[in-house]
Image: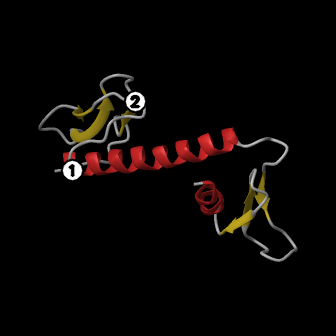
Amino acid sequence: MSELTRCLCGGNAGHIQREAGMMGTMGYDRWHAVRCQSCGLTLGESDRRFRSKAEAGKAWNALMSKAAQDTEALNWIERQHLEELGMGLVIDAPNDGQYYVCGDSGTTHYGKTLREALAGAMKEEI
């Protein structure tokens, strides 16, 4: 089992085991979740989807990784001048159906998803 990624708040995360019902009865259930020890953010506490610590840990690490990527994109957006920033979905034009992002550089980047277009724009700045 791999180590848990730190929470976005910087706190350490830990595994917790949850259960419901009375052991030995049909309604009894046991599952795993992950909770940040600092801010209390919890994944899987009430939805009973993780049957093992490994499953819960893998989902937590994936969530923290995706959230970190989104944070980078939001930070990039925040640094752009609002008069220069543009993003949206192209309709009835070349690149129809694709998303576009145009930042301070003035170059338009296209992608199948908004995240893909943002990634292209962010790479240009580096």
Return the residue found at the far right: 92
Gap between marks 2 and 1, in whole Å?
Answer: 18 Å
Task: Give the percent coordinates (x, y) of residue 60.
Answer: 34, 44
Rendered image quadrant of residue 43:
top left
The location of residue 96, given as percent across then percent down, is 79, 74
Q: Disc 1 on helix, strand or loop? A: helix
* Circle 2 crowding by C-alpha within 10 Å: few under 14, some 14–19, many from 20: some
Label 2 sits on a secondary structure element that is loop
Q: Is residue 108 left or right of residue 34?
A: right
Residue closer to the observer: 94 or 122: 122
Q: Is residue 52 visible?
A: no
Q: Residues within 10 Å of mark 1 (few under 14, many from 20)?
A: some
Give the residue at x 24% y 40%.
Answer: 32
Side of 64 where 103 appears, left or right:
right
Q: Which residue is mark 1?
A: 54
Horizontal side of 50 relative to 8 (left or right) equals left
Q: Which residue is mark 2?
A: 41
Question: Could you tell me which residue is drawn at 11 percent across and 38 percent down?
Answer: 24
- First in sequence: mark 2 or mark 1? 2
Residue 34, position as x, y percentages in the image: 29, 36
Q: Is residue 9 visible?
A: yes
Among the 4 quarters of the image, the one containing residue 7: top left
Number of marks in the image? 2
Pick out the residue farthest to the top. Answer: 38
| Horizontal arrangement in the rendering, residue 61 relative to residue 78 (left or right) | left
